[in-house]
Amino acid sequence: MKITLLCALGMSTSLLVERMKKAADNQRINAEIEAHSVDDIDNQLKNSDVILLGPQIRYKKNELFKKGEAAKVPMAVIDMKAYGATNGEKVLEQALGLNN
């Protein structure tokens, strides 16, 4: 499963990505998790199973969700509390819930 996190520059989510990878390993979940800039959304839609948006770009939600819907890639805005706490387990759970 490929999980992509999008944020303003693709850097602010790097700690969260590492914590999500650790949570996936602990749960024996085979997941590829990466962070990218929101400007790279068109490329990421081609090879992601789910996309999570950082809270700092939620203002672009409507535009991005339309692209996700067209590409049949589920999307959500990362829970703000989980993002702020860099709770990799909680955000991984959110991503897995989108893939059902």
Image (cartoon, grey):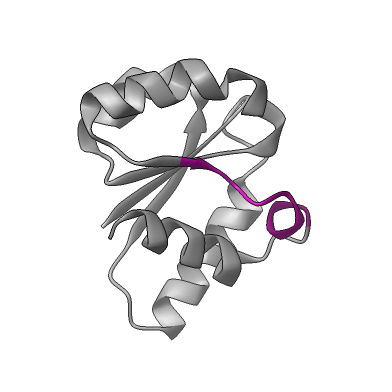
For residue 6, side relative to residue 16 (left or right): left
Q: Position of residue 28 (x, y in %)?
A: 33, 82
State whether residue 46 is above or below residue 4.
above
Q: Is residue 17 magenta?
A: no
Q: Position of residue 74 (x, y in %)?
A: 34, 41
Q: Quadrant of the N terminus?
A: bottom left
Q: Is residue 78 magenta?
A: yes
| Count of numbered tags | 0
**What are the residue bounds of the magenta stretch?**
76-84
State whether residue 21 is above or below residue 74.
below
Residue found 32% across the figure and 30% down from its top: 44
Q: Give the camera-side residue of 56 and 62.
A: 62
Residue found 28% across the figure and 70% down from its top: 30
Dividing the picture into quadrants, the one containing residue 29 is: bottom left
For residue 69, side relative to residue 6 (left or right): left
Q: Give the camera-side residue of 94 and 9.
A: 94
Residue found 38% across the figure and 63% down from its top: 96
Q: Position of residue 86 (x, y in %)?
A: 70, 60
Dividing the picture into quadrants, the one containing residue 25 is: bottom left
Q: Position of residue 40 (x, y in %)?
A: 41, 21
